């Protein structure tokens, strides 16, 4: 089949409703949960602010618009390689230099929701990823791998979403070995439903924060605070994750979408 016919067929499937567009992003606003850094760093992302410029009034009688104050890594967001020191030297590692074809790719969804409900510090291992592949098929080069935990259901409360106590945050994530294995498959990136791409206790891992450290070292990408991964099949969906084209951007809030065949 010619590529033009393929695209025309896709268009027909979208218009007929045989392909569903699933929204994988949370709402971005003043109540969006944001990452809290250790006290010794004391530089947190400021709360999201939405300020009115005009709303069909004296400042603009026929239009409404706002200006925003928002960090690059707020809400559902994309992590570019230059976000981490291990990826800082990639010429194509910023949100404005990443090839746009990399923003659209098949997605593999590893369901860890049962384990994560039972153990908030659950860690996805390389063996668990390999077992998933044995059941659902191999992770192919250029595809995304995301970890379904249903953690997005906690996003209505920042305290529940961050799930921190005196020993730090407690959220599920990957081991270093799992990330190393996923990179070895040629996957283009790693995503999670938690506040960041790493587990809550990842600061104590070797290396610290392996999803950030290793993925960005390999010039791969991250997605955090994803939602509704429970609406995706293990395989077969196409994910669209396009950050804003921020000059030398380390990341960006984004509206992540998935194309999912119905039935």
Image (spheres, grey):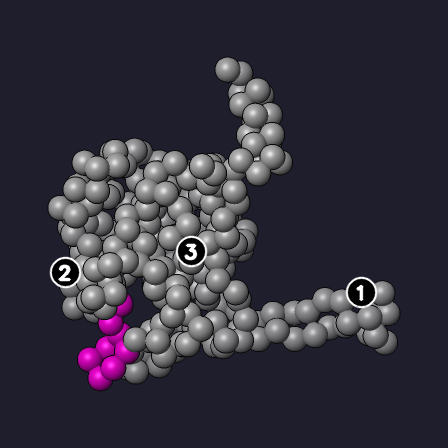
Residue drawn 30% across the image and 75% down it: 163
Out of 224 and 203, give the one closest to the viewer: 224
Q: Quadrant of residue 207?
A: bottom left
Please indicate whether residue 11 sits to the left or right of residue 24 in the image.
right
Tell me if residue 102 can be seen. Answer: no
Tell me the CA gap for discs 1 and 3. Answer: 33 Å
Pointer 2 or 3: first along the chain: 2
Out of 247 and 118, give the one closest to the viewer: 118
Residue drawn 65% across the image and 75% down it: 51
x, y percentage for residue 165?
A: 25, 82
Residue drawn 34% across the image and 38% down it: 235
Tell me the CA gap for discs 2 and 3. Answer: 30 Å
Magenta stretch contains residue 219? no
x, y percentage for residue 10?
A: 55, 30
Whether pointer 2 and pointer 3 mark residues with C-beta atoms closer than 8 Å, the reply is no
Which of the two marks, 1 or 3, is nearer to us in this view?
3
Which of the two marks, 1 or 2, is nearer to us in this view?
1
Magenta stretch contains residue 165? yes
Assign a secondary structure to mark 2.
loop
Assign a secondary structure to mark 1.
strand
Residue under numbered circle 2? 206
Residue under numbered circle 1? 63
Pointer 1 or 3: first along the chain: 1
Residue under numbered circle 3? 228
x, y percentage for residue 229?
A: 39, 52
Please indicate whether residue 254 sits to the left or right of residue 176 in the image.
right
Residue drawn 56% across the image and 32% down it: 13
Tell me the CA gap for discs 1 and 2. Answer: 53 Å
Instruction: Specify the segment rendered in magenta.
Output: 164-171
């Amino acid at each position: 089949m010619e590529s033009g016919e393929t695209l025309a067929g896709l268009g027909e499937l979208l218009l007929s409703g045989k392909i569903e567009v699933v929204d994988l992003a949370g709402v971005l606003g003043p109540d969006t949960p944001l990452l809290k850094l250790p006290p010794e760093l004391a530089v947190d992302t400021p709360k999201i602010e939405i300020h009115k410029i005009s709303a069909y009034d004296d400042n603009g009688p026929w239009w409404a618009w706002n200006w925003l104050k928002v960090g690059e890594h707020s809400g559902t967001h994309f992590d570019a390689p230059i976000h981490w020191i291990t990826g800082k030297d990639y010429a194509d590692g910023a949100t404005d230099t990443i090839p746009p074809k990399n923003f659209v790719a098949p997605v593999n969804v590893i369901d860890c929701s049962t384990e994560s409900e039972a153990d908030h510090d659950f860690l996805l291992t390389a063996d668990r990823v390999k077992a998933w592949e044995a059941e659902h098929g191999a992770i192919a080069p250029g595809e995304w791998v995301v970890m379904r935990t249903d953690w997005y259901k906690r996003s209505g409360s920042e305290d529940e979403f961050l799930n921190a106590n005196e020993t730090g945050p407690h959220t599920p994530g990957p081991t270093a070995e799992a990330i190393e294995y996923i990179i070895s498959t040629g996957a283009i990136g790693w995503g999670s439903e938690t506040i960041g791409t790493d587990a809550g206790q990842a600061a104590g891992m070797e290396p610290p924060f392996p999803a950030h450290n290793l993925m960005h070292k390999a010039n791969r990408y991250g997605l955090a605070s994803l939602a509704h991964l429970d609406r995706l099949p293990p395989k077969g969906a196409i994910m669209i994750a396009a950050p804003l084209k921020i000059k030398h951007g380390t990341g960006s809030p984004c509206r992540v979408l998935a194309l999912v065949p119905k039935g």
